[in-house]
Amino acid sequence: TMRLVIQFITAIQALAVCQAFVAPLHRTATTRKISLEAVKESSSTKKEGGTKEDGKLPPLSTFIKDNADSIDEFCRGTNDFWKQFVIEPVLNYVEIQPSGTAKNDIISKLTAPPEVPGIPRPVWLTILGSFPTALGWYGYYKFSVEEELYQYEIQNGQKVTGCGGYGTLLPFVFGVIIGFPAQFLHIPGGDTLVQAAGIWILLGQVNLYRRVNELCDEAKEELGLEEPPLHGWWALLPPPLDVVVGLRQVHFLSEYWRLKRGESYDKDIVAEELFPFISSQRFTLKEFVTQPSRWFWFTKDKKDFEF
């Protein structure tokens, strides 16, 4: 059984590779236009990327609220459809568990099935799991957080707003596994399939950031936040900016789950000391570029650049 699980995790390591290399290369012209327009907005306002302004919800949240029933049906159907392609030993291994099932040691947390409320996975743990596995574990992380949020919404009687671990990850995996060989063999449709897979995972990432923002907004006092921490549209930007928001998502989702589970605070040295931008209050692109105090531990005392 464990061998099958390892094979499954190895297969989905394509997720991390795509997010780092494939997705940026296959962005459509429309996506690039959205990114450029969003960059322009960031230079003139701090209310970018998903905050409430004048009591109004962000556009994406408004759309989801207005179409809650249809989105709920689509997300459940998508997750159920793709789940049927997973072999039974893997299904049994990654079946959702109640909070506190996993032990507290590092290996147990890295290999634990998803739980509700979700398992806090701080940045240092995510890096520890990702690098030795050539980013393979990050694929499992992506599956786990999506499935935890999906099941959390269901168990709390809410409308589902994400496609879960299966519905988010497997369309991408199948698209890459089938599309890349088709491209190489010059089979028509291969390039389109890879592009569709990249767009699917990017849109899922934007939606994940929206969901994390909404959760953090509920607990912003406990988290010490002035506003939701993520700019969702940064997922559409090229590296390293998409990595910046991705690391922030890891940190703040981990902290939210820690609060929901009633676990004690444990300082994340990577997010809170070595790379302060990961755990800081939300910032604009201009602030990120001109405020070196946010960058690294050795630039904390540097003065802001002025243009």
Image: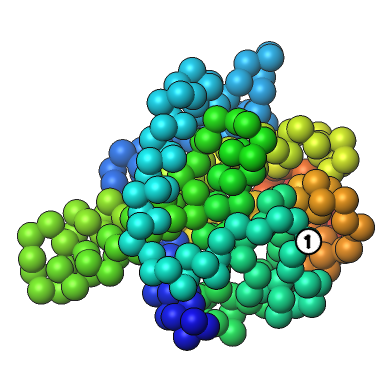
Q: Position of residue 11 (x, y in %)?
A: 39, 74
Quadrant of residue 232 within the rendered picture: top right
Q: Position of residue 206 (x, y in %)?
A: 50, 43
Q: Furthest residue to the right?
A: 264
Protein image colouring: rainbow
Residue at horizontal 88 percent and vertical 40 percent from the top: 222
| Quadrant of the drawing holding the C terminus | top right
Q: How many marks?
A: 1
Residue at horizontal 33 percent and vertical 61 percent from the top: 85
Q: Which residue is mark 1?
A: 100
Q: Position of residue 306 (x, y in %)?
A: 72, 45
Can residue 36 be seen by looking at this rendering?
no
Classify residue 32 as left or right of residue 250. left
Q: Is residue 12 above or below residue 286?
A: below
Residue at horizontal 84 percent and vertical 43 percent from the top: 223
Can residue 132 be seen by looking at this rendering?
yes
Q: Nearer the viewer, residue 203 or 167?
A: 167
Residue at horizontal 66 percent and vertical 73 percent from the top: 110
Q: Residues within 10 Å of mark 1 (few under 14, many from 20)?
A: few
Q: Is residue 299 above or below residue 54?
A: below
Q: Nearer the viewer, residue 206 or 1?
A: 1
| Element class at badge 1 | loop
Q: Position of residue 182 (x, y in %)?
A: 15, 68
Quadrant of residue 218 within the rendered picture: top right
Which amino acid type corresponds to the residue marked 1 in the rendered image?
A: Gly
